[in-house]
Image (cartoon, rainbow, N blue to C red):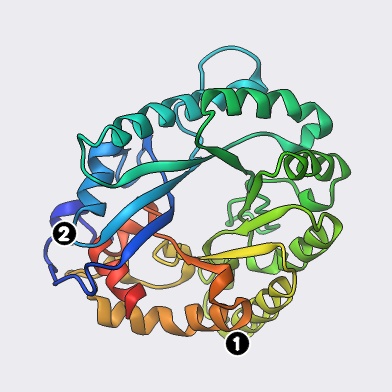
Amino acid sequence: MAYGGNDWLALNPEPTLEPELPICDPHHHFWDFRNERVPYQRYLLDELNADIYSGHNVRSTVFIEARSMYSADGPEELRSVGEVEFVQGLAAASASGQYGPARAAAAIIGNADLSMGDRVEPVLDALQAASPNRFRGVRRSASYDAHPDVESRAEQGLLANESFRAGARVLARREMVYENTLYFHQLPELVDFANAIPELTIVLNHIGGLYRVGPYANRDDEVITEWQAGVAAVARCPNIYLKLGGVGQPRYGFDWHTYEKPIDSGALATGLAPLMNYCIEQFGPDRCMFESNFPPDKVSSSYNVLFNAFKR
């Protein structure tokens, strides 16, 4: 990989397009992975501010769970409350105005094991208590692939599991959101799930989990066709909304992270357009939202360049 963090991203500065346009970034993370070899091990309020104040008029953001800062003790099912407590503190600091006008983590999506069924209610109570004014729902990945080279974050068929669906119905009763990640070949599973719980608001992350490396490399004729059919089917479920982003992650099959000089917004927009435009055509603009997915997508472009590309 050629990416070199912030110094590498600074090699390609460009003016901000439409700098007055107000933006809510609906998907980013906070974390401090000191003992893991990942790009951008630390991404907290200072790091986020450096990105969102790089030119665009970001007025607010939504934090999405990242399995970070879990409590070190207590019942296993409640340890994710530690992450929400942590982010609630960062959000309160941002809301003081001392860090600028944007409101970071104005909404918070935590994590809970919906497979607990009705027993997830006390966990949701604890998450709500940790953030009475910002907690909006949970994300639980359903990503599963049988190939050993593809990371699975859930067991096969999670969305069809009756206990999981019972937990999702608890979310729906509380008028909370279910954020979902999966792989493109699982989109029909999400259709069945959404139709079974039409009262649940579902937010599908990262354009529906396209995957174009490893066992899916050099198979665009099959992969893109299957992804398009899946997106079209999911779009027919009125309770599903789609996030447009995540494509900077290397598994989406682009090599932007290997460039000696970072990609500019014109070239980035050209690469994104066929995917993004197809999604918008299927869902309509009212059910789509551009997401930064920072810091994971930061391995491919700067925040300023990414939102310039979205605007293009």
Q: Is residue 302 visible?
A: no
Horizontal arrangement in the rendering, residue 287 relative to residue 37 (left or right): right
Q: Amino acid at mark 2?
A: Trp
Above or below, 253 against 151 in this view is below
The residue drawn where x is 24% and y is 46% is 101
Q: Sort mark 1 into few (<14), some (14-19) or many (20+) by Cα contacts within 10 Å.
A: few
Say what secondary structure mark 2 lies in.
Answer: helix
Identify the amino acid type marked 1: Asp
> Would residue 55 appear left or right of 128 to someone viewing this image?
left
Q: Is residue 243 above or below residue 41?
A: below
User: In which quarter of the view is residue 91 placed?
Assistant: top left
Q: Secondary structure at mark 1?
A: helix
Tell me the quadrant of the picture where the C terminus can be found: bottom left
Q: Number of callouts in the render?
A: 2
The residue at the point 80 percent across, 58 percent down is 198
Decide which of 77, 52 is in the foreground and name it: 52
In the picture, the disc for residue 8 is 2
Residue plotted at (32% across, 53% down): 59
Mark 2 and 1 residues: CB-CB less than 8 Å, in contact? no
Residue ID for mark 1:
221
Q: Earlier in the sequence, mark 2 or mark 1?
A: 2
Q: Is residue 145 above or below residue 166?
A: below
The residue lying at 63 percent from left, 54 percent from top is 148
Nearer the observer: mark 2 or 1; the answer is: 2
Q: Which mark is residue 258?
A: none
